[in-house]
Image (cartoon, helix red, strand yellow):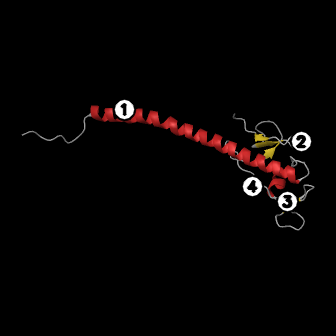
Amino acid sequence: MRRARQAFTLVEVLIVVIVLGILAAIVIPQFTDASTDAKASSLETNKQIVRGQVELYKLQHDGEYPDEKTFTDQMTKASKIDGTTSDPGSAGFDLGPYLQSIPNNPYTSTNTVGSGARGSSAWYFNSKTGEFRDNHTLD
């Protein structure tokens, strides 16, 4: 009588490992691309939302953009036409808030706004031109 096989041979195990390795090599880069695409999409969405709210601020404040130094307060708090800010619901502060918070830059995971060189803040804002863009060192 012949005995039944009770284990896999080394060759069979190696073939299975090689096939799994090939499948992993095909699938893993697709996940990496999806993550990069999601960051890029999130970045563009965040920029468009903030740019729209900056334009609304300008319309309601006699053509003036928010100030670079007080950008976060002017966008996230209530304001008067002269740009002074206070907590929402304060008497006389009838405009805004325009954003609940400044969105995080998905590449830096921070939400700082400045007007300095690339990498000095998550977002760049120019109060003279109204330009709002990402300010991370990756392009």
Q: Which residue is mark 1?
A: 18
Q: Nearer the viewer, residue 88 or 116?
A: 88
The nearer-to-camera label among 4 and 2 is 2
The quadrant holding residue 81 is bottom right
Q: Which residue is mark 4?
A: 101
Residue at 56% across / 37% down in the picture? Answer: 33
Dot 2 falls on a residue whose secondary structure is loop
The foreground one among 16 and 78 is 78
Q: Amino acid at mark 3?
A: Leu
Question: Cα distance, mark 1 to mark 3?
Answer: 64 Å
What is the CA distance from the residue labelled 2 to the residue labelled 3? 21 Å
Q: Residue at x 60, y 43 (%)?
A: 38
| Residue denoted by label 2 | 128
Q: Quadrant of residue 32?
A: top right
Q: Which residue is at 89% across, 53% downward? A: 61
Quarter-of-image position of residue 131: top right
Q: Secondary structure at mark 4?
A: loop
Q: Tag 3's secondary structure?
A: loop
Q: Earlier in the sequence, mark 2 or mark 3?
A: 3
Q: Amino acid at mark 2?
A: Lys
Image height of 58 relative to 4, above or below: below
Mark 1 is on which residue type?
A: Ile
Q: Of 17 and 107, which appears nearest the observer?
A: 107
> Upstream in the sequence, badge 1 or badge 3?
1
**Which amino acid type is marked by label 4?**
Ser
Q: Which mark is residue 95?
A: 3
Looking at the image, tell me whether mark 4 or mark 2 is earlier in sequence order: 4
Answer left or right for 69 relative to 108: right
Is residue 75 left or right of 103 when viewed as pictured?
Answer: right
3D distance between C-alphas at marks 2 and 1: 60 Å
